[in-house]
């Protein structure tokens, strides 16, 4: 299996890469920040897994960067089986509506929502040529209307919109047998989730791979599920 993972140098993205490599898959790991410090953990994986790991420079906010990344992938393969849109940000936690910074909201949407759209626009042709394909958009329970608390406006809006993107894509790709899932990965101990979070990101990464490998047909109305495959309310 060949997979593209965005935001792959740390947090959940890194563990998705690690678990995928340990399973023997070929991972194209998209990274925005390619400084030696940011790349250290991926370089260690490269030393272990060699040709099964391809590191690709990929900033999801920059369409030219996404196109260059697709050209780099094309030098190695014309087909991918899975895209995991994992790159994400959470800025300005707990700002009230009076404190909301619109620039920050636009930047959040640009990464969390439109970033996935850019990647899909340029990588869908690879997935159309894959086998047992899935597209995974890493969402959040913050994007559920049932979880509409006051605060995290930018983040909640961006993930609710990402869930809509997943539903649209699910309908668009239904006849092509490409499965689409919006996945809440749980509250994880990462830079974003903080060290007090309940979940080791490797547990979430393993759960997501179980979904990728079993490609469940979702019986509930929407393709929004958690990392255990349980339905989430949109
Ligand atoms: P982290 O903050 O630990 O990592 C975020 C990753 O996204 C980094 O690799 C970062 O790269 C990358 N990224 C940010 N902006 C861009 C960009 N413009 N282009 C490419 N990559 C970018 O987050 P998590 O691992 O915790 O989160 C992963 C996903 O899970 C996100 O979508 C998040 O919203 C979601 N999520 C997380 C939860 C949690 O509890 N942690 C809960 C629910 C959902 P760089 O190093 O360059 O900044």
Image (tube, helix red, strand yellow):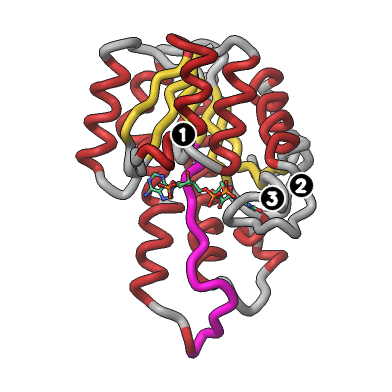
The mark total stands at: 3
CB under 8 Å between discs 1 and 2: no
Q: Which tag, 3 or 2, sits closer to the chain's start?
A: 3
CB under 8 Å between discs 3 and 2: yes
Q: Give the spatial CA distance, label 3 vs label 1.
A: 19 Å
Q: Is residue 107 above or below residue 212?
A: below
Q: Position of residue 22 (x, y in %)?
A: 63, 16
Q: Which tag, 1 or 2, sits closer to the chain's start?
A: 1
Q: Residue at x 52, y 22 (%)?
A: 45
The residue to which callout 3 is attached is 189
Q: Nearer the viewer, mark 1 or mark 2?
A: 1
Q: Secondary structure at mark 3?
A: loop
Compare residues 113 and 47 and report the one nearer the observer. 47
The residue to which callout 1 is attached is 40
Q: Which tag, 3 or 1, sits closer to the chain's start?
A: 1
The prevailing secondary structure element of the residues shown in magenta is loop
Q: Is residue 5 left or right of residue 186?
A: left
Question: In the rendered structure, which segment of residues is drawn in magenta?
Answer: 85-98
Residue 190 in view, yes or no: yes
Compare residues 137 and 23 and report the one nearer the observer. 23
Q: Position of residue 142 (x, y in %)?
A: 63, 61
Q: Which mark is residue 63?
A: none
Q: Nearer the viewer, mark 3 or mark 1?
A: 1
Q: Is residue 72 above or below residue 86?
A: above
Q: Quadrant of the C terminus?
A: bottom right
The residue to which callout 2 is attached is 199
Mark 1 beta carbon near ligand 1 (under 8 Å)? no
User: Residue 159: which quarter of the image?
Assistant: bottom right
Q: Residue at x 48, y 16 (%)?
A: 47
Mark 2 beta carbon near ligand 1 (under 8 Å)? yes
């Amino acid at each position: 299996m060949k997979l593209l993972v965005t935001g792959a140098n740390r947090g959940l993205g890194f563990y998705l890469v690690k678990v995928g490599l340990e399973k023997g898959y070929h991972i194209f790991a998209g990274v925005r920040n390619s400084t030696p410090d940011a790349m250290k953990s991926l370089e260690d994986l490269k030393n272990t897994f060699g040709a099964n790991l391809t590191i690709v420079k990929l900033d999801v906010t920059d369409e030219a960067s996404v196109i260059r990344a697709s050209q780099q992938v094309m030098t190695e393969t014309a087909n991918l089986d899975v895209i995991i849109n994992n790159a994400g940000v959470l800025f300005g936690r707990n700002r009230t509506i009076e404190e909301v910074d619109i620039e920050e909201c636009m930047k959040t949407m640009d990464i969390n929502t439109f970033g996935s759209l850019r990647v899909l626009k340029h990588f869908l042709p690879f997935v159309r040529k894959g086998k047992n394909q899935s597209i995974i958009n890493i969402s959040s329970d913050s994007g559920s209307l049932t979880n509409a608390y006051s605060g995290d406006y930018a983040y909640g809006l961006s993930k609710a919109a990402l869930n809509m993107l997943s539903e649209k894509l699910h309908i668009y790709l239904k006849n092509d047998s490409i499965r689409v899932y919006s996945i809440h990965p749980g509250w994880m101990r990462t830079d974003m989730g903080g060290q007090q979070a309940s979940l080791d990101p490797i547990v979430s990464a393993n759960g997501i791979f179980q979904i990728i490998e079993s490609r469940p047909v979702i019986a509930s109305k929407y393709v929004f599920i958690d990392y255990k495959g349980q339905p989430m309310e949109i």
